[in-house]
């Protein structure tokens, strides 16, 4: 199935490549919903719940964009993509944006004709092993069998890490996180490696998460962020500033609880006013109405709320803010000013 | 007498004259078809150019940066994408060749057994054929992999004082859910390798030991045949066949044993070392699952072809052979099958082609064949969809056409010679 989608998308990319280049905003408005490429299922980041509704950290970004553009956070069609199919799906116009723990790299940004519009999660590649193996460092993994999602940057980092440390390994390439989980739990591989956040999310879905440890080594920089097609700058701006609005909202203390109250009239903080549209014309500048940011924040809350409800310390995934705290709290999350 | 009126050619005849009309239509259709192709190509090139992606193959000389687990040639992540594709191509060929051989053997046995007069055997074979023919091969591949992973023990079960599993066949074969480790042939006085194509991406090491073994075996078989022919000649002349079997066995066995002893042949057994078994040859789960599933699936089709071929030979042939006093087994192998081959081989070719093409489903179980390397990771890491896929199609086309050529030559050899 994945294969046919892939080739179909490829054919579409070839035939309609030129046509999909412009005016994504008009397409989305005409269609009445946003096509958002997400992962095939990663607890906390993007996974369907028991009744089939998608939820998660990446999903929330899609919903915020849909709320800003269309006024309805539910007007999103989630399209699961694998590591291999995601860029083709985006390039062909099958999805309007990707929110799928995708690492921002030079060649993807330039050669693949994609635009990364920011970073919503600063990550790094880690290793998970069963506790019973007694491994404490990734450098003890000489000769281990490693499950690795194919078509990812982690595949390349893995090769580099083992080569640089002059130790050997046996790679087992797999397509999706679910397959990796199956092979790892059956002990067909000793180690599973992917982004540390993904490892935490995967471990959270195990029956006994305590039997598995994530090794201390983080072997790469993996800035994850939403992606749009290169060439449609208006659409890129909308997605970029929607993400920034969520980040600024946390910084300014705007939450899903008080956004209604704060936007009912001008407050005495002009930046809040500009962001929420009670002052100035920021919405017009990106081709939206003045309440766009209000709706984006109302959808799933500000950046901090989205983090806490989906992957924060009180969820099964249990990730600390760490690098992903606001810059004021010692993290790297930082939005340019709304002015 | 007058000459009949000379008919001169007029343009309208292209449409109204039935002698020319079909030609006109064909020429027009050809032009339309060429226009369509030209439009598709120019559209593709134009759209790629507007995306800023020109068609170019320079990425092939860049380092691939990824590792491949099953490699028949030396390969590291620093080698080029071309080398990675080459390693993938060999993996495709390995599974295709293994699959075709197994599918043929299983297929012929099942096809014959389905015609058996034994009710139980015939019915079991019917169930097998119908089950495998009517379920998509991708499901069989994934199913085979799931069984291997879930039902076999992990290497950890072999470890420690109270290991729950042990190696079989005199401690030489380990069956785990990461694959089967079998002993490998080692030579303590090896002749070494010859490297073809220097240091290029297509470099290819050929083991001189292997060449020596093949040469000796070929010579042995040649000598074996000479002895048999000699015995036949003597029998034709004198009526007595000289006893040659001990001579023949010696010719077959002694030289190869002498060679193996000279090369210092010994088996390297797999041993548990660290996380995995080390030493021995590692037949990975992905290869085994793919091999089994493709073989059994294709064998079901081959069985039907074989059955059809046998049924196509008239019953009189069996009866005639029987009345000459041949036993049923010999009737099958000497009379029926040689004739049935003529019916069997053409559809058999297309099944070989199908198996080879189906091997591109390998990525479902993480087997890095040419689709997994060139059409998978390389494509994905370089973003060169069109180039990679065009090349991939070309490669499969070449493999398929090569198989067709060889099978057609074989078909000509067994075909009925008509006079």
Image: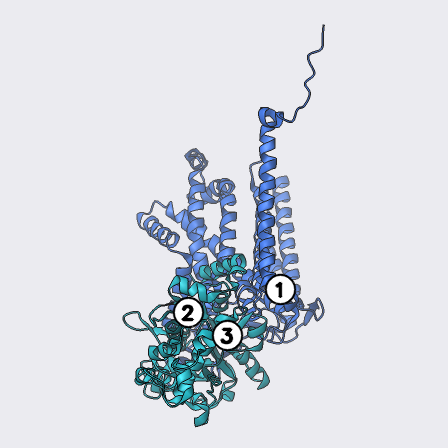
Chain colours: A cyan, B blue
SS state under label 2: strand
SS state under label 1: helix
Q: What is the quadrant of residue A133 in the picture?
A: bottom left
How far separated are the C-alphas under marks 1 and 3?
Answer: 49 Å
Camera-nearest label, 2 or 3: 2
Which residue, as the protein is rendered here, is positioned at the far left?
A51
- Asked if residue A143 is positioned above or below residue A7 in the image, the reply reads below
Circle 3 sits on which residue?
Answer: A152
How far separated are the C-alphas under marks 2 and 3?
Answer: 19 Å
N-terminal label among 2 and 3: 2
SS state under label 3: loop
- Asked if residue B354 is positioned above or below residue A68 in the image, the reply reads above
Q: Mark 3 and mark 1 in contact (Cβ < 8 Å)? A: no
The residue lying toward the viewer, choosing from A40 and B320, is: A40
How far separated are the C-alphas under marks 1 and 2?
Answer: 65 Å
Residue A147 in view in this figure: no
Q: Quadrant of the N terminus of chain A?
A: bottom left
Q: Mark 2 belongs to which subunit? A: A
Q: Position of residue B165 (x, y in %)?
A: 39, 78
Q: Mark 3 and mark 2 in contact (Cβ < 8 Å)? A: no
Q: Position of residue B134 (x, y in %)?
A: 37, 52
**Residue ID at (47%, 75%):** A285
Q: What is the quadrant of residue B219 in the picture?
A: bottom right
Q: Is the residue marked by circle 2 packed among few (<14), some (14-19), or many (20+) residues within 10 Å?
A: many
Q: Position of residue B109 (x, y in %)?
A: 43, 51
Camera-nearest label, 1 or 2: 2
Label for residue A36? Answer: 2
Residue B394 in view in this figure: yes
Label for residue B256? Answer: 1
Q: Mark 1 belongs to which subunit? A: B
**Residue ID at (45%, 41%):** B309
Q: Are marks 2 and 3 on the same chain?
A: yes
């Amino acid at each position: 199935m994945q294969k046919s989608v892939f080739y179909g998308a490829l054919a579409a990319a070839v035939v309609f490549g030129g046509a999909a280049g412009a005016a994504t905003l008009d397409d989305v408005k005409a269609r009445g919903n946003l096509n958002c490429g997400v992962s095939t299922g990663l607890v906390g980041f993007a996974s369907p719940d028991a009744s089939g509704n998608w939820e998660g950290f990446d999903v929330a970004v899609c919903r915020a964009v849909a709320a800003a553009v269309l006024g309805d956070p539910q007007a999103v069609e989630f399209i699961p993509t694998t590591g291999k199919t995601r860029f083709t799906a985006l390039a062909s116009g099958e999805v309007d944006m990707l929110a799928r723990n995708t690492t921002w790299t030079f060649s993807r940004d330039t050669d693949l004709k994609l635009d990364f519009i920011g970073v919503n999660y600063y990550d790094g590649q880690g290793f998970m092993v069963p506790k019973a193996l007694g491994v404490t460092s990734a450098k003890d993994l000489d000769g281990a069998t490693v499950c690795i999602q194919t078509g990812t940057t982690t595949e390349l980092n893995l090769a580099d890490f083992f080569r640089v440390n002059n130790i050997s390994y046996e790679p087992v390439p797999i397509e999706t996180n679910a397959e990796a989980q199956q092979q790892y739990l059956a002990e067909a591989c000793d180690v599973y490696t992917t982004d540390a956040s993904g490892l935490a999310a995967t471990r959270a879905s195990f029956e006994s998460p305590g039997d598995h440890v994530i090794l201390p080594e983080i072997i790469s920089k993996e800035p994850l962020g939403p992606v749009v097609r290169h060439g449609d700058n208006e659409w890129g701006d909308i997605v970029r500033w929607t993400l920034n609005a969520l980040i600024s909202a946390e910084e300014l203390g705007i939450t899903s609880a008080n956004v209604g109250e704060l936007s009912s009239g001008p407050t005495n903080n002009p930046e809040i006013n500009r962001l929420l549209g009670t002052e100035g014309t920021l919405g017009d500048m990106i081709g939206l109405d003045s309440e766009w940011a209000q709706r984006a924040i109302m959808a799933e809350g500000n950046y901090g709320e989205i983090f806490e409800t989906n992957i924060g310390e009180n969820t099964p995934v249990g990730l600390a803010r760490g690098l992903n705290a606001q810059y004021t709290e010692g993290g790297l999350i930082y939005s340019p000013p709304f002015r | 007498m007058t000459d009949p009126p000379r008919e001169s050619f007029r343009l309208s005849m292209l449409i109204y004259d039935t002698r020319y009309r079909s030609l006109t239509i064909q020429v027009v259709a050809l032009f339309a078809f060429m226009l369509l192709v030209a439009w598709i190509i120019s559209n593709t090139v134009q759209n790629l150019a507007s995306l800023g992606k020109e068609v170019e193959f320079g990425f092939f000389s860049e380092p691939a940066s990824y590792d491949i687990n099953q490699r028949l040639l030396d390969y590291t992540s620093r080698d080029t994408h071309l080398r990675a594709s080459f390693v993938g191509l060999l993996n495709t060929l390995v599974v295709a060749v293994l699959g075709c051989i197994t599918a043929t053997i299983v297929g012929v046995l099942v096809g014959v057994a389905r015609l058996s007069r034994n009710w139980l055997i015939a019915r079991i074979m019917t169930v097998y054929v119908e089950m495998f023919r009517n379920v998509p091969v991708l499901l069989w591949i994934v199913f085979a992999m799931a069984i291997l992973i879930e039902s076999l023990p992990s290497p950890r079960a072999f470890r420690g004082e109270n290991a729950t599993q042990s190696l079989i066949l005199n401690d030489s074969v380990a069956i785990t859910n990461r694959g089967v480790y079998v002993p490998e042939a080692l030579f303590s006085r090896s002749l070494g390798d010859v490297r073809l194509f220097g240091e290029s991406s297509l470099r290819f090491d050929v083991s001189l030991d292997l060449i020596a073994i093949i040469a000796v075996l070929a010579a042995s078989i040649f000598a074996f045949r000479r002895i048999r022919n000699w015995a036949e000649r003597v029998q034709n002349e004198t009526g007595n066949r000289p006893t040659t079997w001990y001579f023949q066995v010696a010719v077959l066995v002694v030289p190869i044993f002498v060679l193996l002893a000279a090369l210092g042949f010994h088996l390297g057994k797999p041993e548990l070392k660290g996380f995995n078994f080390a030493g021995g040859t590692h037949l990975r789960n992905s290869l085994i699952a793919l091999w089994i599933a493709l073989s059994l699936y294709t064998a079901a089709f081959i069985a039907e072809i074989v059955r059809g071929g046998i049924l196509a030979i008239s019953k009189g042939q069996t009866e005639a052979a029987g009345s000459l006093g041949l036993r049923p087994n010999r009737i099958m192998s000497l009379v029926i099958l040689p004739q049935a081959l003529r019916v069997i081989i053409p559809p058999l070719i297309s099944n070989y082609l199908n198996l080879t093409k189906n091997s591109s489903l390998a990525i479902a179980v993480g087997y890095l064949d040419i689709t997994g390397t060139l059409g998978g990771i390389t494509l994905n890491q370089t973003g060169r969809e069109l180039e990679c896929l065009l090349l991939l199609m070309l490669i499969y086309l070449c493999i398929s056409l090569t198989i067709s050529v060889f099978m057609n030559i074989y078909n000509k050899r067994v075909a009925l010679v008509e006079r």
